[in-house]
Image (spheres, rainbow, N blue to C red):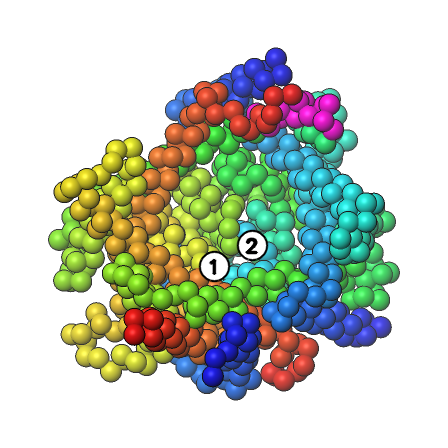
Amino acid sequence: MKRSLPLIFAFVVGIIVLISEFIPHRPFNQIVSTLENWFMIISGFAILLGQISLIRMNANKIANRLPDWQYHLAGLVSFALMLIFGLLWGMQETPGLMGDGQGISAYLGSKPFDYLFENAYMPLSATLFSLLAFFIASAAYRAFIIRGFESNLLMITAVIVIIGRTSIGTMLTGWLPESLSFWHIPNLADFIMEFPNSAAQRAILISAGLGIVGSSLRIILGIERSYLGGDK
Amino acid sequence: MKLSPVAERRIIFTVLLFAVALPLVFPIGWTTEISEYTRIAYRLIEETDENKVVIISFDYDPSTMTELQPMAEAMIEHAFKKNQRVIATALWPMGVQMAEQAFDKVCSHYPDKERGVDYTNLGYKVGGMVTIQAMGRSLSDVYPVDNQNTPYEEIPMLQNVRRLRDIAWISSLSSGVPGLKEWMMVARDSYQVPVTGGCTAISAPGFFPYVNEQRQLHGLLGGLKAASEYESLIGRLGSATTKMDAQSIAHLLILIFIAIGNIKAWHGKKGRQQ
Amino acid sequence: MIQIMHVFGIWLAAFFTLSIFSFLYKDNPFYKFAEQVFVGLSAAYWLVYIIYSIMVPNLFAKLIDDFSGNIVLLIPATLGLMMLMRLHPKTQWLSRYPISIMIGTTAGISMLRYMKSDILEQVTATMINPFSANTVSGVLGNLLLIIGTITGVYFFYFSKKVEGIYKVPSKIGIWFLMVSFGATFGYTVMARISLLIGRLEFLLSDWLHIIK
């Protein structure tokens, strides 16, 4: 019951979705439309579940004074602040529980939620990912070594694309006559992206697509059950 | 002089930092060529009639805004120039704020554009492909209100827009899942609405197969360079164009690092053989 | 006051930016603090938007405005609450029902969409007349497209061991994949550098006012 009923639900729902693609009339289109609307609401609760798990995990680290617990406390405090600001005064044009926050916006220049977003969240998010530029430079120096024919192919393509996607490519071969325009580096880079790259990516898409169709069918038919978790 | 790996890494980081910073302070003014993928995307918007309603979906967060925000601003400006009416949606929660920032910036040059009449922000919905599928049946079911809590039926520009098929074109600016692929799969392949979009450069190679004869994607803006190409097509000196000098110098530096790394490896191999 | 808070906000942004960059030297308390603050802000942002974008307009507002007309929404609300039961070991089994409905819906939609977009349309796009192009490079490109797609798909067939002459298409497929990976690396470099440019522009322009 605890495992068989969910499998039946997954089967019924999956089959209805498949049938509605071929019979887009009542009642299938109405059922699928209802399912799609319910999906959004249940997804919202799923995200709420993730948030609660995160809070629990951080609270556990703080309560047990695990290493670096002070930083997790900072994380929880920032979570609480952002949540309170958002709930009380809302964000941008959306009012909160205490209205539109015009009073506090007069001091900050924007709502507290938006202020934290622009001056804390945005720089943190953008900077964390910008670190990768340094690591790719370091990786290019240490690990991008020519070893055989295939790595040669990879390297040559990478060099053409790296140069071709900048102004340097335009300057290096801009003097070539029209008859040799194929060898103009930006054109060569575009040719590589349009043909051999697209061919390989297409092969990956087709192969992965076949895999997804197979695994979706396995889920609907109840052969794949890993999403049910352990047997409790 | 043999350097430790840690010292080598720090030198690389410092050189890269200066290589990127100096062209920002002292711009060079190099130009770049425009690729066909960008032109196809441009033509879709250019050839769409006036007063048509279009969707720009902001499916990214601030971590990739350097690449995608200039695309968003350029596309909104292009749509405004053609008197098209823009709906902003978001499949990522941060996309809502990105959309508002883009509208604020573009509307400062187009003060006559009015919210609710020329543009609107319907906000964020979770669910990815399933949500887009639901939009295909009924937009008002998915978005009962916009991000200002105005009911869907009271927004003037949405009076004749019931479902995705009433949209002239959709552009998804995406940095991951859900995003451009989901819009293409549902909106274009199921509902035959033309889809174009932009993505970070890292995902661009994977999207090129979709720019094919069937026009699964009507062009693609892949990365900062494509954003600067689009800006030059609409005749705008935007934030992407001003960054291309730094991009070019940094690329050259990466190639120099690769060359030095290979020379060092070759010397090491030769030394071991001797 | 607004001007003071505006300047404070820029300095706060610069502080967090430099805290994250300090990791390049080595791991340190500033980086750890900034990292955890990011996690906290990110989680709260999602939660606030889930409440205002989905829970309120799609569920609570509809139930409050017209309870009897929208009574069926109690079903997804109940399923959502069952999802939250996952938090407790004794009630975890209840979360299987909403998960199975979501998984079943997603599996059905994914199967159809991937079949059409990634298999049928992509195979159709490969079935072109390579000699229909106007230029020599176009014809060459079309031939590469067809050969590359076929050999690439052939490479991913792992159900039978490839030996002898059957290795040749697999090898050619690998070459096309290497070209693609090289192109992807080139684009990855571009993507990463772009992100760094954005941050440096903020520091040099908005914070230090070196760039006008």
The answer to which of A3 and C63 lies nearer the viewer is A3
Q: Is residue B63 above or below residue A46?
A: below
Q: Secondary structure at mark 2?
A: loop
Crowding near pointer 2: few (<14 within 10 Å), some, many (20+)?
A: many
Q: Which residue is mark 2?
A: B60
Q: Is residue C159 above or below residue A164?
A: above
Residue placed at 62% from the left, 46% from the top? Answer: B124
Q: Which mark is residue B200?
A: 1
Label 2 and label 1: CA atoms lie apart by 10 Å
Q: Secondary structure at mark 1?
A: loop
Say if the magenta span includes residue C93.
yes
The answer to which of C39 and C24 lies nearer the viewer is C24
Location of residue C84 (image quadrant)? top right
Please state the extent of the stretch shown in magenta in the rendering: C88-100
Q: Quadrant of the N terminus of chain A?
A: top right
Crowding near pointer 1: few (<14 within 10 Å), some, many (20+)?
A: many
Res A67 seen here: yes
Q: Amino acid at mark 2?
A: Tyr
Residue placed at 74% from the left, 73% from the top? Answer: C11
x, y (%) of residue A102? Answer: 83, 59
